Amino acid sequence: MEPKKIRVGVIGANPDQGWAARAHVPALRSLPGLFSITAVGTSRRESADAAARAFEAAHAFTDARQLAEHPEVDLVVITVKVPAHAELVEAALAAGKHVYCEWPLARTSDEANSLAKSAHSTSVHHVIGLQARYAPAIAYARELVAAGHVGRVTAATVYAARGKGAGARIPSSAAYTLARDTGAGTLEVAGGHTLDALQYVLGGISDVSATLSVQQPVYTIAETGDTVEATSPDHLLLNATLTSGALVSAHIHDAKITDARTRLEISGTERDLAIVSTGAGGPAGIQIGELRLLGARVSGGTYQELPIPSQYRWASGIEPAAGGFNVAQMYARLALDLSTGSRSVPDFDAGLRLHQLLDAIKLSAETDTRQSVD
């Protein structure tokens, strides 16, 4: 008997632009035996109807609560701007539906804590979009480290530079991320995804010393030529310690003009590993596009690409270089959770812990003191 498909309602499903069209819809379509997009929602009737036609959804909504309450929706996916996350997540939870919210979970840790508490008052599955964990290179590196392949981890070095805002120009759709109070700046998005991937491979961060800086204070809106002031930091320098005692140094920033990329090097007592971005998705961050895993086969050797076993690829209907590949990988695991009752994908508690790490980073930068991570 064919398993029942999970019926999905996507909020923020603009057919012309946005993360839903770039990643979530292709990801869900790559898993046709597991998921079906039955509903879409946007803020305008015209775009909602256009999205329903483009994505072959039976229902189109301009009211997120009505989408969440519809009987043909099992899972609500939230892909809109961060300031709207809290209200939409609460609507999905109130309707008793499973919910997948893009990272960042909320504007603040207080909001994230409230959402986690609301989620725990229900029996639904709640998911936060930390899809870098499901990149095959990340998943394999985690297993190698756990198996002692590198020996004892002594240090990790991260360089993560995105091309967003290069040349001091930014598309109008991303301009809101330049404001500190939106909770969607470089620290939250690039920093959050990168540091979550690092912790997933190596374990938690125990304390931090950080510097945050606005190096590009004014941007030009690409479509209009208008200017906008940036109040959210675009550079993070981090010195941290893992709970294992290993040291971490990281530089994460936006507006890289040349060769925007991510490289995470892991130093061990026996071998080293390096996770590096590649292809068209490289300038977008560790969570988007394809990653390679490099390692030395013997102590003192040179880096060589390590073949990643096929067992780390669960979404076969989408190319690894596609922007939605890691999202598809996560959906495949979510489908398994929903069918078996397991809870393996990152939930709102994971999102809250990451928000608290970012709080410690901000407090360290504001007070020029080293901070413990609660």
Image (tube, rainbow, N blue to C red):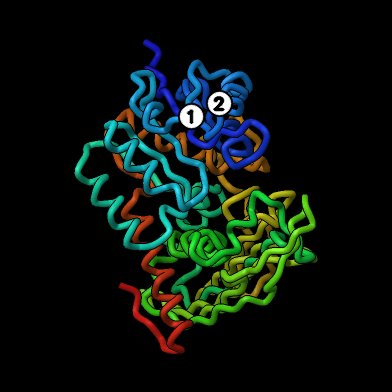
Left or right of residue 316, residue 78 in this image: left
Location of residue 217 in the rendering, given as x and y in whole percent from the top left corner: 67, 73
Type of the residue with mark 1: Thr
Location of residue 105 in the rendering, given as x and y in whole percent from the top left corner: 41, 52
Figure check: 72 above or below 244: above
> What element does badge 1 sit on?
loop
Location of residue 321 in the rendering, given as x and y in whole percent from the top left corner: 68, 43
| Residue under pointer 2 | 45
Which of the numbered marks, if any, corresponds to residue 271? none
- Choose between 274 and 345: the one closer to the eye: 345
N-terminal of the two: label 1 or label 2? 2
Figure check: 227 above or below 248: above
Distance (Cα) linking label 1 and label 2: 6 Å
* Quadrant housing the C terminus: bottom left
Residue at horizontal 39 percent and vertical 62 percent from the top: 108
Type of the residue with mark 2: Arg
Asked whether disc 1 touches disc 2, contact meaning CB atoms under 8 Å apart, the reply is: yes
- Choose between 2 and 110: the one closer to the eye: 110
Furthest-top residue in view?
1
Residue at horizontal 78 percent and vertical 52 percent from the top: 224
* Quadrant housing the N terminus: top left
Q: Quadrant of residue 283?
A: bottom right
Q: Quadrant of residue 27?
A: top right
| Residue under pointer 1 | 62
Location of residue 184 in the rendering, given as x and y in whole percent from the top left corner: 52, 59
> What element does badge 2 sit on?
helix
- Choose between 164 and 328: the one closer to the eye: 164
- Choose between 91 and 186: the one closer to the eye: 91
Residue at horizontal 46 percent and vertical 40 percent from the top: 78
Residue at horizontal 52 percent and vertical 35 percent from the top: 43
Left or right of residue 9, residue 42 in this image: right
Circle 2: is it few (<14), some (14-19), or many (20+) Cα within 10 Å? Answer: some
